[in-house]
Image (cartoon, grey):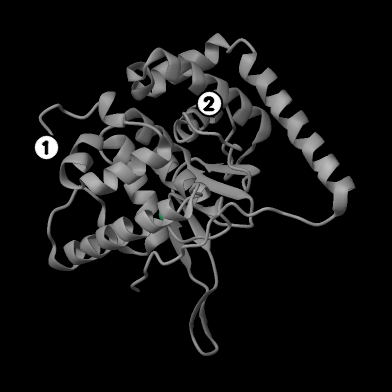
Amino acid sequence: MRHGFTRLACAAKRFHGGGEAYSNSSTMFRFLKQRRRQRLRAQPFPPTWRSIITGNLPIFRRLPPEDQAELLGHVQVFLAEKHFEGCSGLELTDEIRVTIAAQACLLLLHRATDYYPELTSILVYPSGYTSYEARHLDGNIWDEGGEPRLGQTARWLGSLVLAWDDAKRGAAHPSDGRNLVLHEFAHQLDYEDFKTDGAPALATRAEYLTWARVMSREFAALQSAGETGTSTVLDTYGATNPAEFFAVVTEAFFERPRALRGRHPELYAQLARFFRQDPSRYSAEATTTP
Ligand SMILES: [Zn+2]
């Protein structure tokens, strides 16, 4: 299905209504939330958690010291606010929670963040699982078959599902272009402007216009590459729809930034502007990659 990145409305939605009393309590709530998060970020980082991150996330050791410190602070907030649940008999450990949190928080560096506000629970399976969903085919015909999955998330559900073995493998191989955790959390960023359309919350209408222009062209190019079998930096799964495209380019941005910048400079520039990061500076990619 072909989509256009046509949404141009600014995401800076404001919830008015409820009067001054609502406004005051809302402001107080935000203030208290920010203060609680500041305290969490300032707490000493548990040495065992740090050992997990340095052992399981080779990319962490390549980050500048100030980014490392910011990431650890975000992990403290993330783990305090998100609920983890083991599925299919998986017993949750600090290794599972910290390894997932650290990857998810890589997407939050350098930006004002509300820590994936649509998300409350992370469900973790030991490995790939079967998702049973009713899918509408035509008329009154529905398919209720199971589908093998490594991860998924959706708006409004407040949950995100991951296969632990793939989440760990993705962290251990930071330059193969595939990362399940980055992929699923990119979907959560997509939801932050209340739409699922491959555009995260941008600051201005001009940014949305530029984003739409660049992403539409790149999305169409990936669809063509998929149809002709042309080799590409991006996984052609990203040609499924604009939402998957954003998740796939996020994986490539953090895992193969030099290749992405070399072959898709405008796309790279858009992502660098949104994420306020330049992963090509610390990437584990081979330096000979174009
Ligand atoms: Zn996806």
> Which residue has dot 2 on it?
98
View quadrant of ligand 1: bottom left
Question: Closest to the observer: 88 or 67?
Answer: 67
Q: Is residue 268 visible?
A: yes
Q: Is residue 178 visible?
A: no
**Residue at position x 44%, y 15% in the image:** 66
In the image, taking residue 45 as reference, residue 246 lies left or right, namely: left
On the image, the x and y values in percent for residue 181 come to 44, 40
Question: Closest to the observer: 89 or 248?
Answer: 248
Please tell me how crowded label 1 is: few (under 14), some (14-19), or many (20+) other residues with Cα within 10 Å.
few
> Which residue has dot 1 on it?
290
On the image, the x and y values in percent for residue 131 come to 51, 59
* Disc with the residue nearer the chain's start (1 vs 2): 2
Residue 38 position (above or below residue 19): above
Residue 288 position (above or below residue 264): above
Give the amino acid at mark 2.
Val
Q: CA distance from mark 1 to mark 2?
A: 33 Å
Q: Assign a secondary structure to mark 1.
A: loop
